[in-house]
Each structure stands twice: as structure tokens, then as C-alpha cells.
Amino acid sequence: MALLTASRRDTLSTPGAVLAATAVFGLLLGWATYGLHGLNPVLDRATNSSSTWIIWTAVAGALIRFRWLAAWGGALMMLATCCGYYAASALGGTFGSGALGTAAVWSVAGLTGGPLLGWAGWTVRRGRGDLRAVAGAVVAMVVLGEGLWMGLGLRYWGEAAAFLTAGALLAAFLTVYLARTGARRSWLCAVLAPVGGLVFYLAERTVLNGLIGTV
């Protein structure tokens, strides 16, 4: 029985199995975020949000044992999430003529940012030194940056306040978690998260939004 349990554990921890599980979860996440649109205002805003995909990518990275595999898993998960979302959109009859270009932009963004978020999740849980605090700031900055975008870019001040509050709470939680697990200079997470949030907002406004506006 012990040998059988060990064999199953080894199978589930192989790179192929990890990446397959990550891809399946990404597809389901993308499908779910599309399906939850319009049910109520809270769910609509929470699911129509890049930070929802990004936070779960960081969680996936934290669950993966090896750093290199967490980075690859982050890229695969973001791509699979995008595929799941737009596949559900196509089946739902809302995949318009401009959606293919938008899907391509989000796929490239996911392949670019996914490895960073997978690495960040892994590093928060398993890393060493000051990089743990930096990685925590990377995770929290996404929510803060999206809050800035909703307020300054879209003028959705109510949603902006909710995202900024959630981002601040996430940064505080990660800072406490890092401190309790012995991370060096855990306070860097709380300091760098708002700075990173501003950078994320500027990148979303100038690069990503500019690309989507041209497709």
C-alpha cells in the first residue's frame, strides 16, 4: 500500500502531470469567468477582471514544487484561461469580429506575465531571502493596479475602491505571512506593492489598452 501511494504521488508530481492539471484548471477558470458574467454586479466585476486570472496563476505557482515548472505552469495557465474564456464566448455567441485580435493580445500578455506570476507564487511560499517580499509585492500589485485603472481610467470609483481595498488587504496579508514564516525584510512587500500597482496601471493604460484599442 505504501509503495502504491508513493507511486501515485510521484506520478502526480511529474512535470507532464503538473502542466496538464494546470492547463485543465486554466480552461475551467476561463470558462467560469465567462459564465459568471451578468449574474450580479459583484460577480460581474470580479470575473471581468485580469487580476482574477492573475491571482489564481500565482496560487498555482505556489502549489508547484519546482521553480522552473511554476514559471512554465504560469504561462500555460494564463494561455489556457484565455482559451477557455474565448471558447465559452464563441459557444455563447458573443465572439464578434474583433474578438480574435483581442484574444491574441490577451494571450501574448498571458504568456508574458504568466511566468512572472507563477514564479511569484512559488517564491512567496518556497523562496529565500528578500525575493520573497518582492514576489509578494508582485502578486498584490496586480489588484492595486487594476483598482487604479478602474478609478483613473474608467471612472468606476465604487469598483476602484473595492479593488484598492482588496489589494491593500492582500499586501498586508502577504506581509504578515512572510514575517511569520521568517522572510527577510518582509516589510518590503507592503512598501513595493503600491509602487508596483502604479507601474501596472501605467503599463495597462499605455501598452495593453493601446494594443486592444487597435484590434
Image: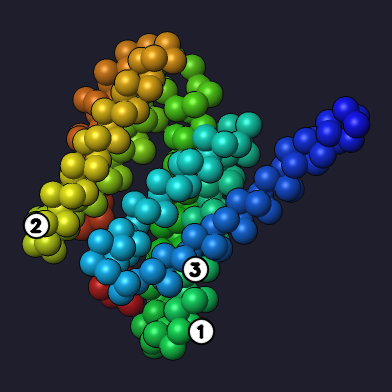
C-alpha separation, residue under disc 2 versus residue under disc 1? 33 Å
* Residue in the picture at 53% in, 39% down: 61
Residue 112, percent from left and from top:
45, 51
The structure's colour scheme is rainbow
| Residue that numbered label 1 is attached to | 91
Residue 73 lies left or right of residue 192; in this view the side is right
C-alpha separation, residue under disc 2 versus residue under disc 3? 28 Å
Q: Nearer the viewer, residue 2 or 88?
A: 2
Q: Earlier in the sequence, mark 2 or mark 3?
A: 3
Residue 208, percent from left and from top:
30, 60
* Residue in the picture at 57% in, 36% down: 63
Q: Earlier in the sequence, mark 1 or mark 3?
A: 3
The residue type indicated by label 3 comes to Trp
The residue type indicated by label 2 comes to Trp
Residue 15, percent from left and from top:
72, 42
C-alpha separation, residue under disc 1 versus residue under disc 3? 11 Å
Question: Which part of the image, by quadrant, shows the N terminus?
Answer: top right
Residue 112 lies left or right of residue 66; in this view the side is left
Camera sees residue 141: yes
| Residue that numbered label 3 is attached to | 31
Callout 1 secondary element: helix
**How many other residues sit within 10 Å of disc 2, few (<14), some (14-19) or many (≥20)?**
some
| Residue that numbered label 2 is attached to | 157
Callout 3 secondary element: helix
**How many other residues sit within 10 Å of disc 3, few (<14), some (14-19) or many (≥20)?**
many
Asked if residue 19 is positioned above or below residue 49 in the image, the reply reads above
The residue type indicated by label 1 comes to Leu
